[in-house]
Amino acid sequence: MNFHGIILGLGTFLCIGLFHPIVIKSEYHFGVKCWPVFLVFGIAGCIGSLFVENIYLSVLLGVFSFSSFWSILELFEQRERVRKGWFPKKPEKKHK
């Protein structure tokens, strides 16, 4: 039996599943101005994927990197979902 597809599929599922709440929390706390962090992680994941010899780790780093890139778009879409009222907006700080 060949479990490579199942293992990589599970890793991909978990990676994408983890990015969903990360995007929501990032937009809530930092807004869309944190998009460069996702870009840096995406680039780092691509570079890591090129140099890691283990095929599982290389593939999962690739999935991680492109999930990071996709999260940039999702940050801006999350801002629109908040604007529409689908997600809570962070309250403004009150000045004394």
Image: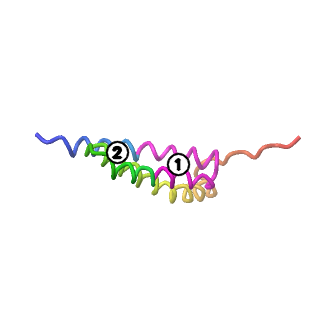
Q: Mark 1: which amino acid?
A: Val
Is residue 87 left or right of 19 when viewed as pictured?
right
Q: Mark 2: which amino acid?
A: Phe
Q: Dots 1 and 2: beta carbons under 8 Å?
A: no
Q: CA distance from mark 1 to mark 2?
A: 16 Å
Q: First in sequence, mark 1 or 2: give its number.
A: 2
Disc 1 crowd, CA 10 A, few/some/many (<14, 14-19, 20+): many
Instruction: Report which residue position mark 2 lands on.
Output: 13
Q: Nearer the viewer, residue 77 or 54?
A: 54
How far from the left and from the top, in percent, is residue 22? 51, 44
Query: Where, quadrant-wise, is the C terminus in this rendering?
Result: top right
Q: Magenta residues: mostly which secondary structure?
A: helix
Residue at 46% across, 46% down: 19
Instruction: Report which residue position mark 1 lands on.
Output: 23
Residues in magenta?
A: 17-42
Residue at 60% across, 50% down: 27
How far from the left and from the top, in percent, is residue 81? 57, 56
